[in-house]
Image (cartoon, coloured by chain):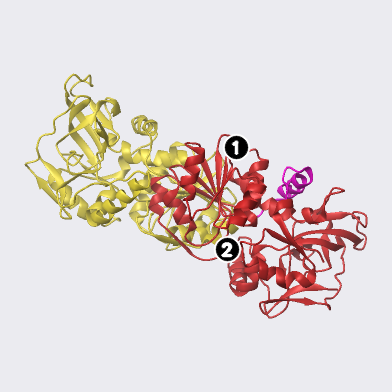
Chain colours: A red, B yellow
Amino acid sequence: MRAAVLRAGEIVVRDDVPEPVPAAGEVLVQVRACGVCGSDLHFARHGASMVALGEEMEGAGAIGTGAGVDLGRDVFMGHEFSAEVLEAGPGTAAPAPGTIVTSIPTLLTPTGIREIVYSNDVACGYGERMVLSVPLLVTVPDGLDPGHAALTEPMAVGIHAVNRGGIEPGEGALVLGCGPVGLAVVAALRARGIDTIVASDYSPARRQLALAMGAHEAVDPAREPAFDAWRGTAGEEQVVVFEVVGVPGVIDSIFRAAPRGARIVVVGVCMERDTVTPLFASAKELSLRYVFGYDLNEFAASLDAIAQGTIDVAPLITGRVDLDGVPGAFDALSHPDRHGKILVTP
Amino acid sequence: MRAAVLRAGEIVVRDDVPEPVPAAGEVLVQVRACGVCGSDLHFARHGASMVALGEEMEGAGAIGTGAGVDLGRDVFMGHEFSAEVLEAGPGTAAPAPGTIVTSIPTLLTPTGIREIVYSNDVACGYGERMVLSVPLLVTVPDGLDPGHAALTEPMAVGIHAVNRGGIEPGEGALVLGCGPVGLAVVAALRARGIDTIVASDYSPARRQLALAMGAHEAVDPAREPAFDAWRGTAGEEQVVVFEVVGVPGVIDSIFRAAPRGARIVVVGVCMERDTVTPLFASAKELSLRYVFGYDLNEFAASLDAIAQGTIDVAPLITGRVDLDGVPGAFDALSHPDRHGKILVTP
């Protein structure tokens, strides 16, 4: 079958990938859509350090995405997918062929859990077909665009961040960074009914997307510091800050600018070491909650919100490509100003 | 009157300090005891950087202890005190002369709040007499050693850390660092009825003090990593980590060693920049809560706990000196292994 794979730092489209074969408990599916995630771009560029970090995380008892991947071999990628059921594995009760499903990007195997994120062996979403574990399948409601259903995964990240952030009615949110994850946070906040959502990003296109996804105000930090804009809009309302940039220096700038008692939900995953001035955090009694991923309930809630229209992902989708367009999509997404989410429809 | 002051980085005892005069709303008191705080040692050594940091904090809307202090002039210090009422200011209703009181180290003046911590003008606890604001006085119960009452302030820091840390029944505590503040945290945890309190410090004397203040186990991290000791003692019990070291590198080591989902209460105030590897915190969904100081209710609760014996401060007091002994006390406390708390009894 055909699939786009990472080979020596480049995305190449292969015609000779062996057909995946569903084992017991699995189902073979035809990929209908797969979103391109920023972490895939990062992995394509910095794979060696991400594999090393993944292994270090795993050694420390944490989730170690990328651990064990051999960059000397082709790497399958694509973890934001929807797909159509083709055929169940031996002796396996599965949704009927033709059913549109999605799943968290995890495969349950007799030898343990394997991620459908970066893998030398497990086919992922940037390909024609893949296998999924039946117990993890979530059925996409009839009539929902499979492209929208593919965004269940990134929207679940936003829902999880808002859930774990513990934002309460009467509190407002300042979202720093309006990449796809930041936009997912904005959408989840709006779905939660938060009254004041101020989003901040240097990119005009992303600010437009933030407004489309539910932000009440989108500010350009080059023109006005985000916390000043927050105070201008929200006054004395208690702020919950969502950090969705994930690069060194952002937390320190928040420590300096945040009001006393602010809660900071760290959604952005910073892959490098970072330096802060902790005295600001102490003197202001700030708190930080690092969040990561989502759970099965949040994943299902995300699909439900998309299906119900509580979260409208349509504005987020700024491009659709076929498998041959994957290399170009990776190039296009390296210019953050141009795109929200590009869907691969194999 | 006599007072020990900081002059050009040295503690000197003066005989010629002008007598404090209580204004309206104030009371003149005779200091009965004043604890030497580690932050005073730090200020004596690194005053210039602490003043600069205090001013930077104040500029950022936070508490800026030390802001405005002129190190070219003598600096009064001493903020953990108990005292005997001598005389009320003009037209002021105050506790009767002879009453033993304590107060948060703050003076309410017509021109604003002034700290009784580091000051060129406001007499503090390392002196014979000082003035206090009547609305902030807390009366020490009859029969309580004024030396014990002087520890209301540092014990309130521990109570505040435990309150803000939000530790729940069924959770256990790992206290990293057993200086006076760490010991206050241990005492507050024990008073709260926490079942598993593991304390960690390199110093054998401090480990002994931790056990005396209520820790169930005190570990030497040079022999066994603190989190290993925690797991050996508490098994799968949810851990709340109290960071009471406050030097660069500690948070990063916690990020690496903490179990998934751990909550970290940052009590130690790190005065330098600090570098962390945020990916560990993300992948494990850690949270950090920076805590600082205490409120008026916690201050009163601290005195109450000391008076009731819920918190027994006796083991903590390892030395008592008069004003002439203050320079020597500062020297002695620079060797952290030898002392818990030294009281100055002018």
Mark 2, chain letter? A
Residue B177 visible, this orientation: no
- Main structural element of the magenta stretch: helix, strand or loop? helix
Q: Are marks 1 and 2 on the same chain?
A: yes
Q: Is residue A343 magenta?
A: no
SS category of the residue bearing label 2: loop
Disc 1 residue crowd, few under 14, some 14–19, many 20+, Cα 10 Å: some
Mark 1, chain letter? A
Mark 2 — residue? A60
Q: Earlier in the sequence, mark 1 or mark 2?
A: 2
Q: Are marks 1 and 2 in contact (CB under 8 Å)?
A: no
Above or below, A245 against A233 in this view is below
Q: Which image quarter holds the C terminus of chain A?
A: bottom right
Q: Is residue A294 magenta?
A: yes
- Label number found at residue B246: none
Above or below, B256 against A48 in this view is above
Q: In the picture, residue A340 is in which quadrant?
A: bottom right
The magenta segment: A293-313
Relative image position of residue A36 (x, y in whole percent):
71, 63
Q: Residue at x 65, y 45 (%)?
A: A214
Relative image position of residue B255 (x, y in whole percent):
51, 58
- Depth check: give the residue in front, B59 or B52: B59
Q: In the picture, residue A301 is in which quadrant?
A: top right
The three-letter amino acid code for the residue at tag 2 is Ala
Mark 1 — residue? A195
Residue pushed farthest left? Answer: B16
SS category of the residue bearing label 1: loop
Relative image position of residue A16 (x, y in whole percent):
84, 78
Disc 2 residue crowd, few under 14, some 14–19, many 20+, Cα 10 Å: some
With A248 as the anchor, is A149 left or right in this view? right
